[in-house]
Image: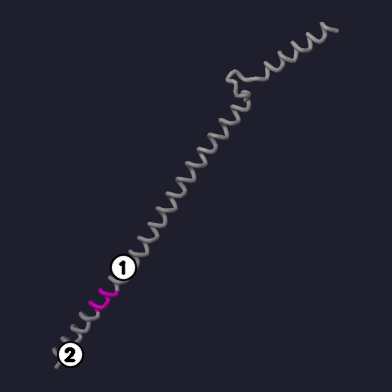
C-alpha cells in the first residue's frame, strides 16, 4: 500500500510539473500564441482606426475647402457677369450714339 501511495504522489508531482510553463507564469505555449495573436490584432485594429480618423479629418477639410472654392467661384462669376453686363450696356450706348 505504501508503495502505491508513493507511486501515486510521484506521478501527481510529475504531471503537475508537466503542465507548468518554463517561465513560471502558468501560461502554456498555445495560450501564449493566442495572446500574441490577440495583441497583434488589437495593434492592427488600433492602427487602422487611427488611419480612419485621419482620413475622415482629411475628407472633412477637403469638403470645407471645396465649399469655400465653390462660394469663391460663385462670387467671381457674379462679378464677371456684372462686368460683362456693363460692357454690353456701354457697347449698346455707343451703337445708339453712332446711329444718330
Which mark, by number, is residue 24? none
| Count of residue discs | 2
Residue drawn at 34 percent across, 68 percent down: 71
When the figure is inspected, residue 35 is found, relative to residue 97, above or below; the finding is above
Name the element at disc 2. helix
Q: Quadrant of residue 5?
A: top right
In which quadrant will I find the C terminus?
Answer: bottom left
When the figure is inspected, residue 42 is found, relative to residue 92, above or below; the finding is above
- Label 2 crowding class (10 Å Cα cut-off): few <14, some 14-19, many 20+? few
Colour scheme of the picture: one colour
Magenta span: chief secondary structure: helix
Residue wearing tag 2:
96
Residue wearing tag 1:
73
**What span is colored magenta in the figure?**
78-84
Residue drawn at 51 percent across, 38 percent down: 44
Name the spot of residue 70 as percent of width and height, x first.
35, 66
Q: Quadrant of residue 69?
A: bottom left
Dot 1 or dot 2: first in sequence order is 1
Q: Residue 79: say if magenta.
A: yes
- Label 1 crowding class (10 Å Cα cut-off): few <14, some 14-19, many 20+? few
Name the spot of residue 96 as percent of width and height, x first.
17, 90
Give whichever of 3, 34 is nearer the camera.
3
Name the spot of residue 72 as percent of width and height, x first.
30, 67
Distance between the Cα atoms at labels 1 and 2? 34 Å
Query: Which residue in the rendered view is the most extreme toward the top?
Result: 3
Name the element at disc 1. helix
Residue drawn at 38 percent across, 57 percent down: 62
Give whichever of 65, 18 is nearer the camera.
18
Residue drawn at 68 percent across, 20 percent down: 19
In which quadrant will I find the N terminus?
Answer: top right
Query: Which residue in the rendered view is the most extreme toward the bottom?
Result: 100
When the figure is inspected, residue 14 is found, relative to residue 96, above or below; the finding is above
Amino acid at each position: 500500500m505504501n508503495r502505491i501511495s508513493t507511486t501515486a504522489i510521484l506521478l501527481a508531482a510529475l504531471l503537475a510539473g508537466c503542465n507548468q510553463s518554463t517561465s513560471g507564469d502558468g501560461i502554456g505555449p498555445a495560450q501564449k500564441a493566442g495572446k500574441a495573436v490577440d495583441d497583434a490584432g488589437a495593434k492592427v485594429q488600433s492602427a487602422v482606426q487611427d488611419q480612419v480618423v485621419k482620413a475622415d479629418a482629411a475628407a472633412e477639410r477637403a469638403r470645407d475647402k471645396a465649399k469655400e472654392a465653390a462660394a469663391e467661384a460663385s462670387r467671381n462669376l457674379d462679378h464677371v457677369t456684372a462686368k460683362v453686363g456693363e460692357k454690353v450696356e456701354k457697347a449698346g450706348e455707343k451703337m445708339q450714339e453712332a446711329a444718330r
